[in-house]
Image (cartoon, rainbow, N blue to C red):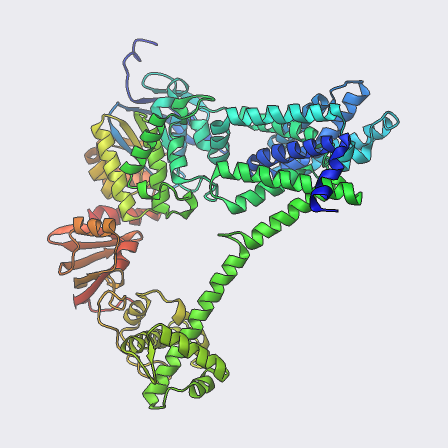
Amino acid sequence: MSVLDWLLDPLQYAFMQRALVASVLVGVVCGVLGCYIVLRRMALIGDALSHAVLPGAAIAFMLGAQDFFVGAAIAGVVTAVVIGWVTDNSRVKEDAAIGVVFTGAFALGIILITLIQSRSVDLFHMLFGNVLGVEDRDLAVTAGITGVVLITIVLLYKELLLHAFDPIMAAAIGLPKTALHYLLMVLLSLTVVASLQTVGLVLVVAMLITPASTAYLLTDRFPVMLGLSAVVGTVSAVVGLYASYYWNVSSGAAIVVVATIIFFLAMLLGPRRGLLVRMVRTRRAAGRTATEDALKHLYALQMEGTPLEASALASRLGADERDARRRMSVLRREGLLDGGSLTGLGYDRAETLVRAHRLWERYLVEEGGLSDEDVHAEAERLEHLSPGDMAARLDLALGSPRSDPHGQPIPAARPPVGNGDAPALIDLSPGTKARIVALQETTPEGLHRLADLGLTPGTEILVTALEEEGILLETGGTVRRVDRTLARMILVATTTSPASGRS
Amino acid sequence: MSPEEAGAGGVSLRNVTVSYERKPAVRNVSVDIPAGESVAIVGPNGAGKSTLIKAIVGLVPLDAGRILVHGRPVKEVRLRVAYVPQRGTVDWDFPVLVRDVALMGRYGRVGWIRRPKRADREIAAAALDRMGMTKYADRQIGALSGGQQQRVFLARALAQEADVLLLDEPFVGVDAATEEAIFELLESTRAEGKTVVVVNHDLAEVRKQFRRVLLLNNRVVAYGSPEEVLDPDLIRRTYGGRLTMLDVVDQMARR
């Protein structure tokens, strides 16, 4: 049997055609409405309302009403109102109020349904769905509700978006907060009714939450989220339907399992926030650390006068020779190593790392009270995480020490050519006079702003005060405030400093 | 409209008392903010500054008193009032882009059910441009710095084209570029004759940027020009001998 036959064969049956249409409708309506439920953080209330429609549907049946969905929708809204009332009028918080009210309503519904079970209402099918048993009348209800819900959402698109995103502004421009909230509750109750035959009321919350959450992981645009969620919902419903047909499993359960699998696939493989992508990023960072370590050890070997060979590097790294050779070839590719010696660039980079490492050690011993033996491992980690001006800040805080706690010399800072080792404005203490030597800011707006403030290379400045938000300085007789971000970008050479350092 | 209210522009508060979580946060405040004025509300934490602003916007019910905007209850003139709450009141992970947020400023004017038109998009884009946020228009709002987020919400308020602008602590946690953008905004809106009310902490800036200052500590301590109101004695009374006093003195000295 070909795949096409496998897909088309079941559709020769009218019940299967109805089931397919119902699945698509439910996938779309739950997917779309679910976005609002997820973004408004109403997952719990969605679960509650879906259970609470049961007594409404049961009472409608008992009254002999053909349109039991009206009873269900009324029960949903009544439940939402009662939850709000309990929250507002007792010390019970909302989550507990939801738990009290919906379980009570659900239990009442079960009793009522059991009482009328003889009359054509199957409790099991209401709870877990029976998509293969969808009849024309059910289909009409589902289609009608889907139409009403989608049209409402299209018409009130911007009102519902603002209500979900920023309820305060929504209220400020006069949108009726309570009315919109209960409108969502009505739509939610109707959607639950529309989904009863397909997924059943126990699992319908999954169709509201899971496809919408999947879409939320994958996009930053709300209209895209609505569309993606509808697609995920539909795919889940249709795949679940076939599973239900071929393996005779509960349709609701099959649909929800498919939706859940899609969710976890998106979480693992999502293009931007997926765990796999993040893992690759972490590994790249680890690779950089490994390369930098190799560079540092090669530098040490070169200082000792030992030839830079893979075997020597391997023994220093505690790694095997193949690993050492691989790291050396990475360094060659990056132009840091050339044949048997470090290039000028490699030498500079290594010294920067060693400087950061030894300054960190010194800092951890002096300021952190760690013992000499403990600091090496910690400094090893920190040196790779240090932004450009970190070494300069440590140097200043420590009063420019010459050696690390083990007595080894700390290499001097690289000359201030914008590589971040010159002190930045942010490192200066009040009373310090300095000259701006370079700007690390590279965006045109940033440079423009600095120029507007009169802060260009060669300008003499006097730091007058440090504030929470920034640094006050005087230049050419006027006082300027520079925020901390900007102050990091301005590299300076001090001309006079106050008596005491900033440590 | 009674004769005394006829033609009254700006914002007028009469004997306003408002509760926050069942405790009175603002007591018996009577203040007139003439149209086109810029007012800074200054006071310690818990002085009812935010509550007062929310009351003007109509977000919290009044226990007593009356607030009129351009001589009418705010409900009738909502389109003429724009409000920027303190940062951190929205979900920054929400899937909306910067330009979507700016466009929300137009929602009130567009009206129920109707879609924003091209003119609305242009106004929102111009507002973003004025706040220097055009190049971030396609970013998700969570991908911005705190200052940039603040500028987006200011742009949204600008897009509302309101003539009363209420800003709650716009300077908290923002960078220098944003601070500058806010000052420029205040200056230009003033030049356009709009009424601006800002909750602010920085007394030095208040002195430079605002024509009137309201010292508030649940009730009005003083209201008038910065020269009249920013008097060490009055400030001490506003801050009631709390430790924040030290900051106040610092700021005064720095000026």
- Residue drawn 54% across and 37% down? A227
Decide: is A287 above or below A81.
below
Q: Position of residue B90 (x, y in %)?
A: 46, 39
- Residue drawn 47% across and 28% down? A158
Q: How many marks?
A: 0
Decide: is A148 above or below A31.
above
Q: Is residue A362 left or right of residue A22?
A: left
* Residue A497 appears in the figure: yes
- Residue drawn 35% across and 49% down? B243
Q: Position of residue B49 (x, y in %)?
A: 37, 35
Residue nearest the viewer, comparing B111 with B181: B111
Q: Which residue in the rendered view is the most extreme toward the right?
A: A118
* Residue A381 appears in the figure: no
Decide: is A148 above or below A46.
above
Residue nearest the viewer, comparing A337 with B54: A337
Q: Is residue A113 left or right of residue A90?
A: right
Q: Which residue in the rendered view is the most extreme toward the left?
A: A476
Q: Quadrant of residue A269?
A: bottom right
Residue nearest the viewer, comparing B3 with B182: B182
